[in-house]
Image (spheres, rainbow, N blue to C red):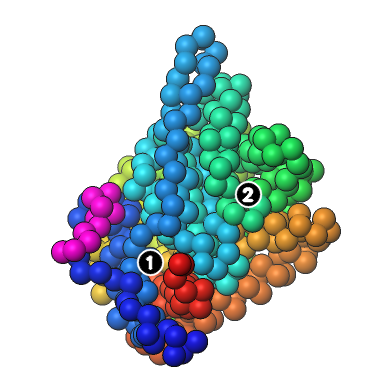
Amino acid sequence: MSQASASIPATSSPAALHPLPSYLQEDKLGPWGNYLQQVDRVIPHLGSLARWAETLKRPKRILIVDVPIHMDDGTVAHFEGYRVQHNVSRGPGKGGVRFHQDVTLSEVMALSAWMSVKNAAVNVPYGGAKGGIRVDPKKLSRGELERMTRRYTSEIGIIIGPNKDIPAPDVNTNEQIMAWMMDTYSMNTGSTATGVVTGKPIDLGGSLGRREATGRGVFTVGCEAAQHIGMEISGARVAVQGFGNVGGVAGKLFAAAGARVVAVQDHGGTIYREAGLDVPSLLRHVEETGSVGGFPGAEVIAKDAFWDVDCDILIPAALEQQITTANAGRIKARMIIEGANGPTTPAADDILQERNILVLPDVIANAGGVTVSYFEWVQDFSSFFWDEDEINARLVKIMKHAFAAVWGVSQDQKVSLRTATFIVACKRILHTRELRGLYP
Ligand code: GLU
């Protein structure tokens, strides 16, 4: 192998001969540009594997689909959908599907690339993929949502499958949507293919613990990091942006461990309580009303004041590009745990590092969801289901182990935890890339 690989020329071509297509160029602002900057920061640390690094800058496969559906009022509406497989060197593509009015191809490309890095960081045998539809699902009836989900699944059916690419929930998608996706794929292939998506209802091959897994992973790495920097969780003040499946669960676990959740922001408002919010009641309020807005007994603060809140731990658990140069200098927290994907821009990352604020990056901090997705997929293949204690114990073990490795690299090489995670993950991806070799 060493002889063979020594004779393989580097994959990178001079930019002048093969410029990246415009949609892949870094100077286009947005999540994909941010991801490319993160890759550039890791390249000097890849040793001989750096010759394959161009692979990380080009998604393997991009599918754009038209999703036409009959609306309830008799009209026909068209939505734009995407599925991007960034890398499949280590295994089938894996990553969620997002329904949101702001979804763009650049965003889905970045999210798929972060899945490659995340899956390699926790060493689950997957590549990275992501999908999305540009739609505000809150404006659709249940019937319209089902028809859109089914048509989208059918359109991307040519590239997904239990051994090809396995979607899962992400922003605004849930167990019911996974059930429709599983059914549509199964109908089209004449099979009962539970392993084609994860995050399914328990009665349809879903896994215990999957719903809470991302938040549990956020909590687990947060506790590990707190130990390293001598921070007590009990009594720590926590601010959370986004109080859904990730932020809500993380907030609940931190509160149960004695932390004070002092501020929460979501699309419905920003609330604050110095003595700590009653998290179980807040979760019930969100369940009933759809947002934290109007929660009794909390002070309402301005949206932008969220970033000034006096806290020890900040958990962005909503969307990308929230922590920017406009607010990074104001954040009071000692530690930021990225529950969302891509919440911090590279320029903001630099400010936080200069200010000695520890950032636990998305690609490790929110990897708990896909880790239990992996358990779900394994259980579906073996048709043998594990109990919740076993799932949580295995999840915590993987998260702690992965975090310890990343922490070690960051200390040894004096780099941020984000760059350390990229070093660990990109080496794994590019090593398999090299082992597999170029076809033909
Ligand atoms: N959407 C989640 C993420 O961003 C989970 C993906 C999965 O389970 O495949 O990590």
Q: Amino acid at mark 2?
A: Gly
Q: Is residue 316 above or below residue 69?
A: below
Q: Is residue 423 above or below residue 319?
A: below
The disc label shown at residue 161, or none: 2
Q: Please state the extent of the stretch shown in magenta in the rendering.
A: 16-25
Q: Confirm whether residue 223 shows in the render.
A: no
The disc label shown at residue 55, or none: 1
Q: Amino acid at mark 1?
A: Thr
Q: Confirm whether residue 96 shows in the render.
A: yes
Horizontal arrangement in the rendering, residue 176 relative to residue 319 (left or right): right
Cβ(mark 2) to ligand 1 < 8 Å? no
Report the front residue among 119 and 15: 15
Task: Say which quadrant the C terminus sits in.
Answer: bottom left
The residue under the point 53% across, 40% down is 156
Residue 24 in the magenta stretch? The answer is yes
CA distance for labels 2 and 1: 23 Å
Q: Earlier in the sequence, mark 2 or mark 1?
A: 1
Residue 131: x and y in percent read 48, 45
Residue 345: x and y in percent read 30, 59
Q: Quadrant of residue 212?
A: bottom right
Residue 82: x and y in percent read 44, 41
Q: Residues within 10 Å of mark 2 (few under 14, many from 20)?
A: many
Asked which secondary structure carries label 2, the reply is loop
The residue under the point 37% across, 48% down is 107
